[in-house]
Image: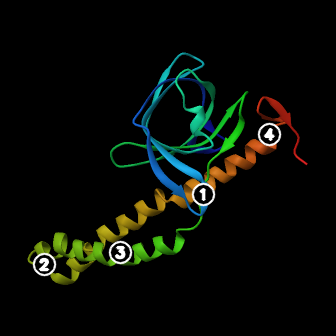
Amino acid sequence: MSIGNNPNVIKVTGTIREINGRTFMGRNGLDVIDDIWHYAYVVVENTSGELLKFERVTTNEKIDPEIEVGNTCTFYFRRIWSWKQSIFHLIASESVGRGVNNFAFANAGKVAHAMTMAKAVPGAYILGLAMFALPARFTIGLSHALWLALIPPVALLVLNNMTSIERVRKDSIALQKELERTRVGQKFDGRELKTM
């Protein structure tokens, strides 16, 4: 089910059996035509008859028309691991009628994300002080307790690195290049599309 050597990209060929909770999430960066849509869940019956339920699915308006009950095509999901349940980004679709469609997040929020992390890491350290250092100062000493307060900011940085939208963007662009490289003739509106 996974593509290449990336276990986070899941390829599923099948028919959509059920969708629920379609909501508009906003625009994807500066591109006005690239709307982002979110589904509470999408149930796909693959070619071997298994029913697969993907919860919390995000995609864009290029792939969104493929998410229709009864539609058969190939979907490429990018999994983001979460502490409770996985989140999925539908980063590509491939069908006979509509060809290949891709979804990559805009690359516009790096500065805003860095500023948020610059505020969040010291905040996490203060939270760690309140959680670990103050209660532990009586048992193991204050100097050792200050090291314990590093647990929340380090955990925040590790989680941020593992679930970064930048990783989803890189995987999406890599998949897009792979799909373009392996296809002989792309289809557009049911006709062959020759790239010039």
Mark sitting on residue 137: 2
Circles 2 and 1: CB atoms closer than 8 Å: no
Visible residue check, residue 10: no
Q: Earlier in the sequence, mark 3 or mark 1?
A: 1
Q: Toward the viewer: 100 or 169?
A: 100
Q: CA distance from mark 3 to mark 1?
A: 33 Å
Circles 3 and 1: CB atoms closer than 8 Å: no
The structure residue drawn at horizontal position 21% and vertical position 83%, both measured from the top left corner, is: 143
The structure residue drawn at horizontal position 40% and vertical position 73%, both measured from the top left corner, is: 116
The scheme the figure's colours follow is: rainbow
> Which percent across, then down, holds residue 144?
22, 79
Mark 3, residue position: 121
Q: CA distance from mark 4 to mark 3?
A: 43 Å
Res 4 → quadrant: top right
Q: Tell whether 121 sits left or right of 8.
A: left
Mark 4, residue position: 182
Circles 1 and 4: CB atoms closer than 8 Å: no
Q: Nearer the viewer, mark 2 or mark 4?
A: 4
Mark sitting on residue 32: 1
Q: Amino acid at mark 4?
A: Thr
Q: Amino acid at mark 1?
A: Val
**Secondary element at image label 3:** helix
Q: Amino acid at mark 3?
A: Val
Q: CA distance from mark 3 to mark 2?
A: 22 Å
